[in-house]
Structures are given as C-alpha cells and as structure tokens.
Image (tube, grey):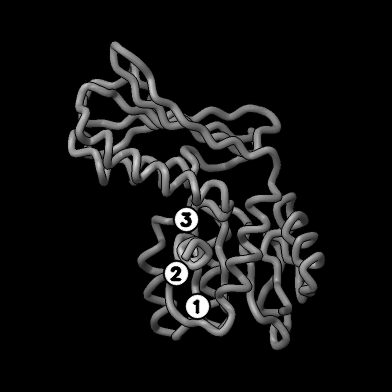
Amino acid sequence: MKVALFGYGKMGKEIETILLDRGHSISHKTKSDTMLNELDFSDTDVVIEFSTPNSAKTNIAFCLTHQLPVVVGTTGWYNHLNEIKDICLQNNGALLYGTNFSIGVNIFFKVNEYLAQIMNKFEDYQCEVKEIHHTEKLDAPSGTGITIANQIIEHLDRLNHWENVSQNELINEQVLPLVSERLPKVPGTHTVKYENDIDKIEFTHTAHNRKGFALGSVLAAEWLIDKTGIYEMKDVFNDIIK
C-alpha cells in the first residue's frame, strides 16, 4: 500500500522505517506547514496521522472529505471527536483512532479492565494511575493515561471521575488520581496501583522506544484498507487475538 505520513517527526520517521520494511511505500511526508490542498493524493491508499494536537482536527477532516482512510495516533484533539465522527459518516469515510497503538499497551488495557472488575469487590483498596512521558509531549495527561483511568472508572463503582492530581491532593474519595510526569527521553510508562493498609498491587507498562507505537499504527493502516466507518485500535487488537 502507498501511505501518506501526516507528521514527519520522530514518530513519523519510525513509521516510515517499518512501512518500508513491510514492503509498503510512502506517497507523501508532510509537516505542520504543508499545504495539503496543493498535493496530489490520487495514488495514496491510507494516511497515518501523527502530527500535533493543534493540527490533528484539520488533517483528519481533510482526509475524510477527500476519501482518504486515516489512522490517527495523535492525541489531545478528542474534544473535536464528535464533530470528526459526523464528518466521517457524512462522507462515508474511514477513520481509525486510538490513544495508543502499541500491542503491549493494548494487552495492558485488557488486563486493566479485568483487574478493575475484580477490585470492585474490594472497596478498601485505593487506586491511582501514573503516566510518565518525554518532555516534548504536548498534552497531559496522556491519552493512554486517560483511557486507563476511564476503564477503571467504568468498573469501580466507588469512583466517578478522574483528576490530574496525586493521591495526597485528593479531597473527594470518588475521584481517581491520574498523575502526570514529564522527564527527558521517556517514550512512555504507565502504572496502575491499588493499595490498602495491608498490601499493594501494582502493574506497569514501560515502552523502551517508539517502535511499538509505530508498528501498531502500520498494522492498523493495513487493517483499515477497504473498510468504511469509525474504528478504534481495540477493534484491530480484538481481531489479532481472536
């Protein structure tokens, strides 16, 4: 397949390497100042979008109105999600988005949901989510951290929303603390902790590099070809583990 890369930073370059290794080709590589209307996308099969939160909405809308299937790895734009979904449906487009395309993280998501269902029975455990990323990451908390927190809230009756604070800053017991840290050269670390006076249960996903995110986005692009509709990375993952 021929793929256009919207966003050609560190992640875009990693995706390019994997695409070429898997026998695909690149039709375009764009940056935030690229004028998309001036490019010819007639030979492009799918777009992989890893730009910035400020550029994502415009880029996604362009794809959907020009019949370009688009895989979106950028986060921080989800306040426009309903509008983008409407544009997709109106144009019979193909949209696949996700807060994290890493296969390892999607395994983590499955474990997180299952553990939260179990921990709902044990109300004396306090829960906390922590995410650590590199200092270049523009949004906080991370999209992955938000997904993890929302999964927990869905299954823990004692919690009703999350806040981007630490456990000792909480004033409401129904709030799940979602802690963000930004440190140099950290691709992404996410930890879920349950703790009471007796013991602590903790599990962590640590990305060693960007390759897992890049590979997942390529797998998603391959999966999206010849489809229409609105999908999430979990749809791709569920197909993989069938």
Residue holding disc 2? 231
Q: What residue type is labelled 1?
A: Ala
> Which one is in front in this view, the residue at disc 2 or the one at disc 1?
2
Residue holding disc 1? 94
Nearer-the-camera pick, 40 or 131: 131
Which quarter of the picture shows residue 86? bottom left
Is label 2 in contact with label 1 (beta carbons under 8 Å)?
A: yes
Q: Is residue 49 above or below residue 192?
A: below
Task: Provide the secondary structure element on which disc 1 rests.
Answer: strand
Task: Please count the marks in the image.
Answer: 3
Compute the Cα span from label 2 to label 1.
8 Å
* Residue displayed at 27% across by 23% down: 125
Percent across and percent down for residue 210 are 69, 46
Residue 59 shows up from this direction:
no
> Which one is in front in this view, the residue at disc 1 or the one at disc 3?
1
* Residue displayed at 59% across by 35% down: 206
Please tell me which of labels 3 and 2 falls first in the chain.
3
Which quarter of the picture shows residue 26? bottom right
Mark 1 closeness class: few <14, some 14–19, many ≥20 residues within 10 Å: many
Q: Is residue 91 above or below residue 170?
A: below
Compute the Cα span from label 3 to label 2.
16 Å
Percent across and percent down for residue 134 are 64, 34
Q: Residue furthest front?
A: 242
Residue holding disc 3? 77
* Residue displayed at 80% across by 73% down: 23
Please tell me which of labels 1 and 3 falls first in the chain.
3
